[in-house]
Image (cartoon, grey):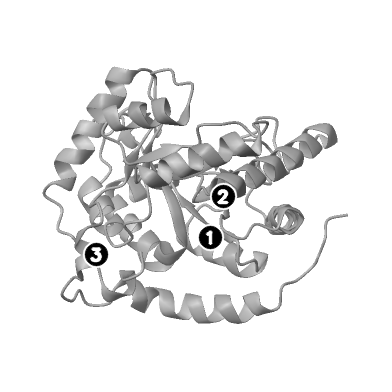
Amino acid sequence: MLSKKKTMPRRTFIKNSLMGATALAYTSVTKLSAAQTKLPLLRLGGPTFEKFDSPDTWVNAIKKLGYNAAYCPVGAGEKDDLVSAYARAAKKADIIIAEVGAWSNPISPDEKTRRAALAKCRRQLALAERIGANCCVNISGSRGKLWAGPSPINLTEETFDMIVETTRAIIDDVKPTRTYFTLETMPWAYPDSPDSYLRLLKAIDRRRFAVHLDPVNLICSPQRYFKNGQLIRECFRKLGPYIRSCHAKDILLSTKLITHLDEVRPGLGALDYDTFLRELSKFPRTPLMLEHLPNAEEYRLAATHIRSIAKTTPIHRGPWLESA
């Protein structure tokens, strides 16, 4: 049976934080401090295709791509001294290790699969803690046959409660102090909207639970597709202070009936990157990570597109970022 342990200070923290999040994220921009102006306007990262065998060669591979954020370069089985060496190299090179993936199905209807997923989540969260990553990320899972697929009971109160108890148990077992466990937004599983993410933050009630934002995954209808800039603004207005990492993709609505939405390379779809980057610039320690592209050239084109937009996106940083 999953633990129902509570951390009482979390309730006050969440209540106060949620009440102030909207006002905080939209505080009027004032004169930037010297520390703020030195922060990169965009923390962009992605996978590397160049092989590396040490922290130094890894840093070189990241820098060659012009990235200042990266996926975790080591596995959970690596020794502590090597993990620490990568962490030190990243810090020295001003590279943020954005996230450690824990991709699995911790609410699977198959008990063996579920137990293996829970073990993986704990193991990967521990790795994120060891290396100092911004977060460990997974999806909440699915109660269907496909680990990341739809199910008629995914978006039910029963499943919501399962996600709450499962996530609490993972965090309580690992007890992270400098990283966060997050759930990537999804079209057919919780969290499937800014409001459902707010519900999860309050219900899970753990200081080390935070937000992973993939806006493309939230676009599951023509209505959201054509108003995705509005959706992105809502995400940052409600969740901004809790977001630890974002994914960079794009989405295209076809004219084929009934409704077909396809993930495409950034620049080939309709995602409002101008709004996305403007909102993201309020939180300069939050990286934007490219994913799901087939080769190095596609990643280069995606990065070029995003950087071209970033060059013309107004910086929007408020006084709450003094310590960022």
Q: Secondary structure at mark 2?
A: strand
Q: Nearer the viewer, mark 2 or mark 3?
A: 3
Q: Residue at x 32, y 69 (%)?
A: 321
In depth, the one of 296 and 220 nearer the eye is 296
Mark number displayed over residue 197: 1
On screen, residue 322 above or below 58: below
Mark 1 or 3, closer to the camera: 3
Q: Position of residue 252 (x, y in %)?
A: 31, 33
Q: Give the x, y percent position of residue 57.
A: 40, 25
Residue at left 31%, top 51%?
Answer: 228
Nearest to viewer (mark 2 / mark 1)? 2
Q: Give the crowd class for mark 2: few <14, some 14-19, many >=20 residues within 10 Å.
A: many
Screen quadrant of the N terminus: bottom right
Residue carrying label 2: 183
Residue found at the far left of this picture: 312
Q: Nearer the viewer, residue 170 or 62?
A: 62
Provide residue 313's location: percent of width, then percent of height: 15, 53
Can see residue 125? Answer: yes
- Reading the chain from its start, which is encountered first: label 2 or label 1? 2
Question: Residue at coordinates 34% horizontally, 50% vertically from top-left?
Answer: 223
Which circle's residue, 2 or 3, is located before the other in the chain?
A: 3
Could you tell me the amino acid type at mark 2?
A: Leu
Three-letter amino acid code at the position of disc 3 = Gln
How far apart in space, not on screen, are marks 2 and 3 (Cα)?
29 Å
Query: Is 197 above or below relative to 252?
Result: below
The type of residue carrying mark 1 is Tyr
Q: Are marks 1 and 3 in contact (CB under 8 Å)?
A: no
Q: Which residue is mark 3?
A: 36
